[in-house]
Amino acid sequence: PVVIATALVDSINPCAIGVLILLIGTLLALSKDKHKMFITGIIYILAVYITYFLAGVGLLLFIQRFNLAEPIGVIVGILVIILGLIEIKDFFWYGKGFSLVIPYKRSLQIKEKIKKITIPGAVALGIFVAAVELPCTGGPYLAITALLSKVGFNPTIVAYLLLYNLIFVLPLIVILLLVYLGLNTKSLKKWKDKNRKWMRLITGLIMVALGVLLILFSLNIISLRIY
């Protein structure tokens, strides 16, 4: 339940949704070929999925290799609580002070790459975006990988990572399908901007709760069972 709830919250992150809307809108502006847009979008989403999954596996192996589950759990827990409070702050004062957003320089690079996008280039774009989105999306994922590292590394944990990332990209797949079926990207962008602060509030609250849970698990105050 913790993995699923966190993945659902992480999946409605405005950064990930915003980049996909920009990609789809640019592809449709350059060409009215919806089939090509759909294929490119699927390849992009698949690249994001694989990149995030491999990053999670790499982090788990690193923590297990150096036996860092307990100390890193407390550190990550504190970090996630701080990041969650920043997200909550943006519900009340968005854009004021420090915010968890894609760096401006990186956002310009994304826009330039999208303008020159090809189907093979969608793979590189997915990997690039997955990396630069980490300030936005990294908190919940980092908390989950740190939490799972307390259990170990086995097929069940790998399955949880696969499930987490599937849920993470699910809204992106839904958005791509909606546009393919005729929904206007401007309507999607308007919806995202209107609900952005609520996305950040929900994400922030979940991150604070995750941080507290992670600290309690790491200090063995609460036991952790994985089925």
Image (cartoon, rainbow, N blue to C red):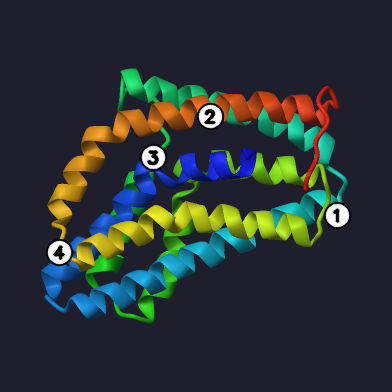
Residues at marks 2 and 3, CA–CA distance in whole angstroms: 18 Å
Q: Earlier in the sequence, mark 4 or mark 2?
A: 4
Horizontal side, residue 160 vs residue 107: left or right: right
Q: Nearer the viewer, mark 3 or mark 4?
A: 4
Disc 3 versus disc 1: distance between alpha carbons?
Answer: 31 Å
Q: What label sits on residue 206 in the rendered view? A: 2
Give the residue at mark 3.
Answer: 101
Q: Are the two marked residues, 3 and 1, in contact with CB atoms closer than 8 angstroms?
A: no
- The residue that appears at 79% across and 49% down in the rendered structure is 63
- Disc 1: which residue: 65
Depth-wise, is mark 2 or mark 3 nearer the camera?
Answer: 2
Whether residue 135 can be seen here: no
The quadrant of the picture occupied by the N terminus is: top right
Q: Residues within 10 Å of mark 1 (few under 14, many from 20)?
A: few
Q: Which residue is mark 4?
A: 182
The count of marks equals 4
Q: Nearer the viewer, residue 55 or 189?
A: 189
Asked which secondary structure carries label 1, the reply is helix
Amino acid on which disc 4 is placed: Gly
For this view, does 156 lie left or right of residue 1? right
Amino acid type, callout 3: Val
